[in-house]
Image (cartoon, rainbow, N blue to C red):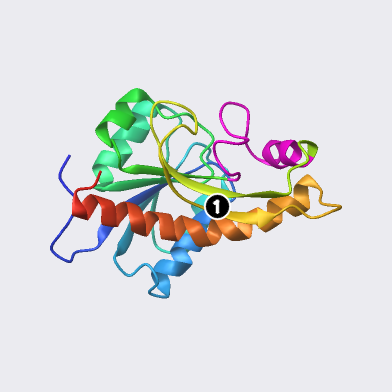
Amino acid sequence: MSGINVNGDRTKVAVLVSGGGTNLQALIDKVADGQLADVELVKVISSRPDAYALERAAKAGIATAVAKEQSDVLAELKASGAEIVVLAGYMRVLSPEIIENYRNRIINIHPSLIPKYCGKGFYGLRVHKAVIEGGEKESGATVHYVDEGVDTGSIILQEKVPVLEGDTPETLAARVLETEHEILAKGLEKAIDDLKKGDR
């Protein structure tokens, strides 16, 4: 695929979703208020037709698609002209073909401090339940590149949040989610910068 824009044009970003889309909304809001002025959200692709994230995208005027098969996801990405792909609550493992086509151009947000509490089976409230049961004093969120493994790509950035006495998986999840909303945008900016510099 073509290289990243270096002539001042906005970087085209596609977002893959499966659920409510609060991280997507955070990106939409940051594009709208100028915090992500160099980003154009060109398409939101969902693995599920009932994902509320699709409504968020439509309200923001962003093209949407539902793609259950990985071949369809790849076709939608190519058709969108996306230069970077963001996984925001996407509950599928990407095919090797997608990863190869977008090598070092796919980022994910995970609700723990990788390499702790990540990998196969660690998603949603399961992550926060495991953190609490593990007696951890802190958790957090990680933005990382996506490779052929599950949560194994190189880390872009992390931010810690405290695990408080009396926390439930739900209360910890809410605290971590607030951090996700902030660092996903920062991680996207860093990924774009790395590509422009040729660091990736």
Residue 144 in picture, x, y percent from top left: 44, 43
Mark 1: which amino acid?
Gly
Q: Label 1: which residue?
A: 21
Residue 162 in picture, x, y percent from top left: 70, 56
Q: For the magenta stretch, what is the residue range?
A: 111-132
Crowding near pointer 1: few (<14 within 10 Å), some, many (20+)? many
* Residue 22 shows up from this direction: no
Quadrant containing the N terminus is top left
* Residue 68 shows up from this direction: yes
Depth order, front residue of 76/21? 21
Residue 181 in picture, x, y percent from top left: 54, 59
Determine the secondary structure under disc 1. loop
Residue shown at the point (51%, 40%) measured from the top left: 90
Q: What is the chief secondary structure element of the magenta stretch?
A: loop
**Image-quadrant location for residue 146:** top left
Residue shown at the point (41%, 55%) measured from the top left: 187
Residue 74 in picture, x, y percent from top left: 32, 33
